[in-house]
Amino acid sequence: MADPTKEESPVAQAEAATQDPTAQQNAQVLALLHKLFGEATFTEVAEPYGLLTVTTKREHIHNIIAGLQQDQELMFHFLTTMCGIHYPENLNQELGMIYHLHSLVHNIRLRIKIFFPIADPVVPTITDLYATANWMEREAYDFYGVIFPGHPNLIRILNVEDMDYHPMRKEYPLEDGTREDKTDLFFGR
Amino acid sequence: MAVNDALAGTHKIIEEAREQQGGQLVPTLNDFSQELTTLNLGPTHPATHGIFQNILQMDGERIISGVSTIGYIHRAFEKIAERRPFYQITPLTDRMNYCSSPINNMGWHMTVEKLLGVQVPKRAQYMRVIMMELARIADHLICNSILGVDTGAFTGFLYVFQEREKIYEIYEEVCGSRLTTNMGRVGGMERDFSPVALQKLRKWLKEFPAVMREFESMFTRNRIFMDRISNVGPISAERALNYGFTGPNLRAAGVDYDVRVMNPYSSYEDFEFDIPVGTNGDTYDRFIVRNEEIWQSLRIINQALDNLPEGPFHADAPHYYLPPKQAVYKNMEALIYHFKIIMGEIEAPVGEVYHSVEGGNGELGFYLVSDGGRTPYRLHFRRPCFIYYQAYPEMVVGTSLSDAIVILSSMNVIAGELDA
């Protein structure tokens, strides 16, 4: 039916046209974020694959998410997901929490990251803002050992209760590192 | 004397019960029972279709509070994914929502394609749409017919299970497997639709609407069924959004959020379809929304099949897309690429990407952090079941045990997706 070479060009054009509005929209959202919370609040700003990503300090996280939820202009009413992450090499910033917010009204997504030392893995809870944060925070506690003071029921969720470590941290390899029967000379394991 | 005391006590209880209920209802046996019962619903209960444990506090027949325990089939997918090359993660996604595996597979493939910057040709996108919508129909058919079984109507389940079997036969023709499909690849489909697959698909598209109409005529306006599930387990739009509901459960509450429309992927913007919404988010609304979505999915499949573009069924991306097996034996480059891809030695950019698709149960998201290595540095699945199942205790409070069963059934909680 249709010629694939002809198909390509309008698609590419449409892609180029939509990419620009995304960048513009992100710039607008960022300007609003700076206006609401101050420029110094955000230590790092990036746009990987068109999704505005800001890094902040954990002291501000509750404030920011509450502010975004109440803001009449942005209306970030939906917490898509949140998850932990572990970078053992980043000294005093080993653990992180990553929040994905979605403004369903304007269809804007926003990613907020915080990093904190593994020796002091305490992050304010946002269960008072989003009921859905309850199990997500339990999951982050279960797998990364992040503590959320104020959480109504911070216990393990997917792993057994008597587990004494947090398995998604990078120091726990998936397989026993001392096993030799699986070693591959050329590609390693 | 003792008898009189006991009688006085009883009268007092009746009076209190009358006051509580506005003095209208005749007191029942429940009003006399002073002690609560703890009921373990699950982990293995025949009515819960999966391994869910709910510890319910019951006052007679009525549920006072509930606590959900999950994780019975937790398989550490996120941890395993940190050790696997991208293409080996597809079988993990099969095992999340196993009622609609192709959607999970293709959602994951699209995430990797977004990271790698691979453009998928139109034909492959349309083929994906057809398979994903078939999967959605299979998923919704299971949910709605099982809801019938839980309310005592077995016939509808038998009717539509035959149709699901036919969908699985189409899967078989397309990818070779039925339940855990591992369908498609990064960069497109592994093979074009065979003539048999197309013939089966066309035949099914012709025959299925009659069965679906019959199924609907058995349930939709059935007085017994409506009385049984109307106003059971309603949830307001605000609560649903606060709980992170997505998919049919959110739409039943009246919010028209659908990833296919909001952030179109795989050429969904080319098709015309409606997003059905409910009003009060009760079990009946969820049932009706799913039924209507089946019709809309049929519309999409018909449009995609009629306008299926000619051309390649996979992207021209030899670094990421496995070459045909015959070429591997004859062609040096094909052998090298085959080897590199199988060993996971492909070049992935450093970056992070979030991609979501409209799964059978809602927004199925993949958050992939790549450090440029052969495996993801971190992969997080946004599993819609996990997120909305936490509303279950709130939804069952005040209802009876039999209502709790139909609420669970109509929410379509899939254990595999819940526990990952």
Image (cartoon, coloured by chain):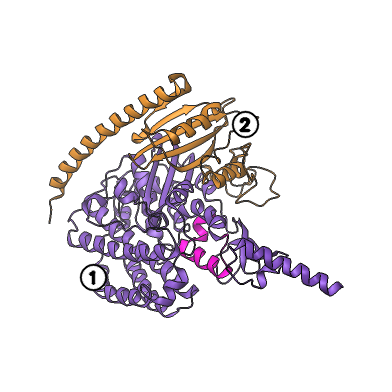
Q: Residue furthest right?
A: B1
Marking on residue B202: 1
Q: Looking at this view, is B394 or A83 the one in front?
A: B394
What quarter of the picture does the N terminus of chain B occupy?
Answer: bottom right
Q: Which mark is residue B226?
A: none
Give the chain ID for the purple colour: B
Residue B181 or B208: which is nearer the viewer?
Answer: B208
Secondary structure mostly seen in the magenta stretch: helix
Q: Which residue is mark 2?
A: A118
Picture coordinates of residue A100, whole percent (x, y): 44, 39
At x 78%, y 72%, the residue is: B7
Who's the residue at 70% across and 44% down the image? A164
Q: Residue at x 86, y 72 (%)?
A: B2
Q: Residue B11 at what x, y percent from top left?
A: 73, 69
Query: Dot 2 lies on which element?
Result: loop
The foreground one among B313 and B210 is B210
Residue B412 forms part of the magenta stretch: yes
Q: Which residues are magenta?
A: B397-420
Q: CA distance from mark 1 to mark 2?
A: 57 Å
Vertical side of B203 occupied by B316: above or below: above
Amino acid type assigned to the residue bearing label 2 in the image: Ile
Q: Which chain is orange?
A: A
The quadrant in which residue B317 appears is top left
Would residue B383 appear left or right of A164 to someone viewing this image?
left
Q: Position of residue A60 (x, y in %)?
A: 52, 27
- State which chain disc 2 sits on: A
